[in-house]
Image (tube, helix red, strand yellow):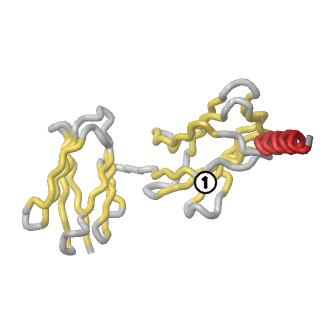
Amino acid sequence: MRNLTFVVFFLLLASSSRCQENPAVVQFEIIQVQAGAQLNFTLAAGNTCLGIRILRSDDNTSFSEIGFIGGVCGSVSDNVSYSYTDSMPLANKVGYYQLDLELLGTSAVHSFRYINYGSEPVVAVPNISEGLFHLYFQNPRKAPVRLTVFDLNGRKIKETDYPGINSIDLDLSNERAGEFIFNINIDGIDNYNGKLIVY
């Protein structure tokens, strides 16, 4: 009888702690759209809350509310998807996003870099560094890309082909300090040039 009591108590304990868990966010993605950074997320069936606060941080520590989806959220029986667009995302730097599911806790933190091209076809982040650069460019056709890097004497330092991408992580940390010219060729048609400085 004592063993049976322990098993029943254990099952009740396990059941109650499952009820207190944060709702499952079964999908969370952030994409760049013309209007800003679009957050798309889905709450798993069986989870409800009283509104969703959209939080953002520039340091992954101090979060501020940037939006709110009001009313009862989620569903007892179905997955429910939501979308929110941050119309003023942090430009050309990493922003951290989190959902506060009122009364039920917060989601995991998701990072995203919104690229503001302005009038430039290519953005290098940073454009002055010890050698690690992130190059962002528009490639809506997902066409093949060739990156070529030259030193100021015209010597080819690097040439790499990539399948339909729109960003490249470039490592020039093994090169001597100085200026470098890069060329991004998309599908043999579009050419974008820029300068990088390694210190």
* Residue ID at (7%, 62%): 154
Towards the viewer: 49 or 139: 49
* Residue ID at (18%, 60%): 181
Type of the residue with mark 1: Arg
Mark 1: secondary structure: strand
* Residue ID at (46%, 50%): 114
Residue 4 x %, y %: 87, 39
Q: Is residue 77 above or below residue 138?
A: above
Label total for image: 1
Residue 104 x %, y %: 76, 45
The answer to whether residue 58 is left or right of residue 159 is right
Q: Quadrant of the C terminus?
A: bottom left
Residue 151 x %, y %: 13, 65
Q: Is residue 10 above or below residue 76?
A: below
Towards the viewer: 64 or 117: 64
Quadrant in the rendering for residue 196: bottom left
Q: Is residue 115 above or below residue 72?
A: below
The answer to whether residue 34 is left or right of residue 152 is right
| Extreme-front residue of the structure | 1
* Residue ID at (33%, 54%): 123
Residue 46 x %, y %: 74, 31
| Extreme-top residue of the structure | 77
Query: Where is mark 1, residue-wise?
Result: 56
| Extreme-right residue of the structure | 1
Q: Quadrant of the N terminus?
A: top right
Towards the viewer: 49 or 125: 49
